[in-house]
Amino acid sequence: MFSNLSPEQVKQLIVVIILAATPAVIWFIVLFKGRKTSRTPLILAFFLGTLTVTPLMALNYLWLFFPSLDVYKAIEQNINEVHFAAFITLVVVGITEEFVKSLVVRSIDLTKIKVQTINDAVKYSILAGLGFAFTENIFYFFYIWQSSGLVGLIFPMIFRSIFTVCAHMVFSGIFGYFYGIAKFSNPIMESKLWMGERSGFVRFMAKFQNISESKAYKELTLLKGLFIAMFIHACFNFFLEFQMLIPVIAIVAIGFMYLLYLLAHKAGAIAFAGMGRRSTMAKTDTDVVLELLGMWTKEGRYKDVVDICQRLLMRDPDNKVVQIFQAKAMDAQKLQNVENAFGSLFRDSDSREQDASLRALIKQKVLMEMLKEKQSPLPAPTGDQAVQPEATQTGPSSPPSNPGPTLPGPSLPTPGSSAQ
């Protein structure tokens, strides 16, 4: 595409590269400004993402020289219904693009940098999508400029810089989350077993492949993340192909919220890399505590789980299973508080009336107790505090029929009293 360019086209290409780089830089700053993280692995992930277009271009050139291998042409020739043929084609596009982008986080994990947390996998995947979108935009912008002129480039440039770039980052980020879950499948699977959440399908796949349940869980999680990313990408491409912008924007928004939902789990921030220190607790004691944590988690006693985890981590700070229990309990506790607060806004009128009546009764009871406290006589002074009144008259042994509030100080004489 860029072969035999004229001097004018070279200038246009330079402008196009600047236009494509601008949203990439802005997104990078928005995502990572102020975050305490090393820039080297982030830049590496972005750079590798820019190279992911290369295998796709090589595949297109391969089909150019070997038409019999062209999947797109085979779909066009064998499927008559236009929309279905377009959807199948775009599914293939989404599958190939997401598979190639997924190689970035896998490659980084093989270096000395490695993926040390689930959030690391998400960050590297997001930057791989950003790098891919940057290179893809160069091709799109240059092609649109050549076919529609600079004025025709304005709207596609704005749309792709915002929504298409964001879509690629979201799709890749979703896979990155599941990649992190799969990488650290051993402690995650162990925590699920302690809570009695053993999956029958995982157990079946483990027996079918003659592998451990953690290994089966890892493979299924990888496939799940890749499938979700590919499916959302294919739907995005399909609606974009037919200029259905509202569904396109909706897909990006829903995918973004789904990624935020995944990232909201604090378990994603736990560092799993390294062997850590050896536990100071005996394994039997640890197993007993883990069994207790699993039982309490199922019963919804999240506060107790958090407290026990905090105490256990003081003895065994590198216990990943306990860290996951604590993170899940904290997430569930916060979610429970949010649900309670949210549900209180939608109580029916009867509940609100009952609450108002209950508050009125409580208020009335408090007022009555305060009035009773004011009307009660003071306790009789004892010891040195007893002071004889200076009056020469004393009152009767029984109080008046209509006494007023008791006042401090000496008693007042009453009529009919005799002087002593």
Image (tube, grey):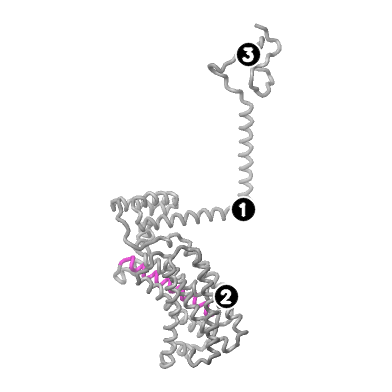
| Residues drawn in magenta | 212-238
Residue 272's image quarter?
bottom left
Percent position (x, y) of residue 334?
49, 55
Percent position (x, y) of residue 145?
57, 86
Q: Which residue is mark 1?
A: 348
Q: Secondary structure at mark 2?
A: helix
Image height check: is 210 above or below 306? below
Image height check: is 277 above or below 148? above
Residue 247: give its label: 2
Which label sits in the foreground, 3 or 1?
Answer: 3
Name the amino acid type tagged 2.
Pro
Label 1: few (<14), some (14–19) or many (≥20) C-alpha neighbours in 10 Å: few
**Is residue 105 shown left or right of residue 85?**
left
Seen from the viewer's position, the closer of residues 304 and 61 is 61
Q: Which residue is mark 3?
A: 389
Q: Secondary structure at mark 1?
A: loop
Name the amino acid type tagged 3.
Pro
Mark with earlier residue (2, 3)? 2
**Residue 176 can be seen in this image:** no
Classify the position of the C terminus by image quarter. Answer: top right
Mark with earlier residue (2, 1)? 2
**Residue 333 can be seen in this image:** yes
**For the point 59% across and 15% down, which residue is it?**
387
Image height check: is 366 above or below 57? above
Name the amino acid type tagged 1.
Asp
Q: Secondary structure at mark 3?
A: loop
